[in-house]
Amino acid sequence: MKDFKFHNPTKVIFGRGKISEIGKELKRDGIKKVLMVAGKGSIKRNGVYEQTIESLKNNGIKWVELWGIMPNPRLSKVYEGIDIAREDDCDAVLAVGGGSVIDAAKGIAAGIPYDGDVWDFYTGGPPSKVHPIYDILTISATGSEMNGNSVVTKDDTLEKKGMHGAPLTNPRASIIDPSVQFSLPKEQTAYGAIDAITHVAEFYFNGSKELNFPDRLCESLIRTIIDNTDVLLDNPEDYDARAELAWSATMALNGMTAVGRGRGDWASHQIEHALSAIYDIAHGAGLAIVLPAVLEFNRDIHRDKIEQFGERVFGAREDADMVLERLRNMYVEWGAPVRLSDVGIPEEDIPKIASNGSIGYPIGHPRKLSREDVEAILRLAL
Ligand code: NZQ
Ligand code: ZN
């Protein structure tokens, strides 16, 4: 095991009916007024908005609202939120939604006390002062509820970039009520699961030799995500399966899977961010296309690990190519795309994707990938 430091300051409040606790959390921290950030309206249809407002009222917390954060959130909405929060003197930002809403809220929280352009934090170093962030999670996927990352797309250049401001940009408290995810469309449940699997895979396939606990933690997380996604695609209202999937997805990117292992690969994510920036596809859908292709490209350095993964996750010791075929087949069964053509992206777009500014060359670990390598990976995904 490699040496490590592990610090995660986010308080997680998990369970059915727990949205009612948000007001109390804010009050305890001395927060008087929040900017509530939300997406396109799912929280009005499934009762999450009502529960949130009731809890704020019960605890004397004032609020203003910013709606319309889209999946793959845009920088322009972050600017809008910063302006509103400053004008209305909000002393915290409360995200109510999925990763896109939470990420936009983190950008707003970093931008409020900053004199310059908040985009600086996505292209340079992390912020040194951030407004307090809280969230009520409505889809398990990104792990944003328990990490300090925010991923935002710049409107004009279509660069999708991450701010990595932990621990300052970690939510102070996150409410995870798995039952509010009963209303998710099936494809969103599947894309969320694929995102979480890929977060684990980015660390698992990082060139480290076999590790006992770190490897088994990753394998257990992925197996749990698979089993519970299978249940949920048949029965979206199975509470226990929602809860198991929710906590596994949070654990998949809260720092635990990095412990003892060192840095991750993150090539699949960088390449996917170019896809979702240009074509506005769901992040998990893009990862279903990219991760198997990256592993195929790198299979010689990861051969033992891919076969170990096959044995411990899919239950059969097989050749690496067969394991990757199983992974793709599982994604197809879940209704996800696994080829660029499945989402209508033609071969002639490959150079444009590989030169999108979301990808900061060289990418990947341990193997450093060039633009030509990324083009080759995308051709494996045709
Ligand atoms: O906008 P609303 O109406 O809320 O609808 C959303 C959206 O259409 C809907 N939804 C969410 N909860 C629901 C629901 N519909 C019904 N019932 C519910 N309970 O689901 C759709 C997708 O939401 P979104 O927030 O976009 O999903 P996700 O959580 O997958 O977030 C994806 C974004 O996070 C970034 C991705 O790149 C992408 O921009 N990532 C963030 C990371 C992080 N902060 O650590 C890491 C990831 O690797 C990723 O890059
Ligand atoms: Zn991801």
Image (spheres, rainbow, N blue to C red):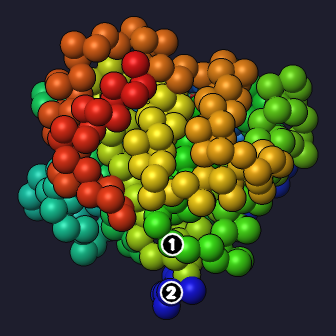
Q: Which residue lies at the image location 42% right of the left edge and 25% below the top edge? A: 381
Tell me the residue that label 1 is attached to: 208
Up-down: is 186 above or below 137?
A: above
- Identify the residue at image location x=59%, y=60%: 304
Q: Which residue is drawn at 28% across and 14% down?
A: 347
Query: Mark 1 CB in 8 Å range of ligand 2?
Result: no
Residue 177 in sight? no
Q: Quadrant of residue 166?
A: bottom left
Position of the C terminus by quadrant: top left
Residue 20 at x, y percent in the picture: 75, 52
Q: What residue type is labelled 1?
A: Ser
Residue 255 coordinates in the image, percent (x, y): 54, 70
Q: Which of marks 2 and 1 is nearer the N terminus?
A: 2
For residue 2, which numbered disc appears in the image? 2
Is the CB–ligand 1 distance for label 2 below 8 Å? Answer: no
Is residue 110 visible in this depiction of the protein? Answer: yes
Answer yes or no: do the residues labelled 2 and 1 have beta carbons within 8 Å? yes
Q: Is residue 91 above or below residue 318?
A: below
Left or right: 243, with 90 as reference point: right
85 or 153: which is nearer to us?
Answer: 153
- Residue 8, by quadrant, is bottom right
The amino acid type, in three-letter code, at marker 2 is: Lys
- Local SS, label 1: loop
Local crowd size for mark 1, using a 10 Å CA cut-off: few (<14), some (14–19), many (≥20): some
Which percent across, then down, holds residue 258? 53, 71
Query: What mark, if any, has residue 134 been given in the picture?
Result: none
Number of numbered labels in the structure image: 2
Q: Which circle, 2 or 1, is nearer the viewer? A: 1
* Residue 145 in the figure: left or right of residue 275: right
Q: Which of 146 and 320 is in front in this view?
A: 320
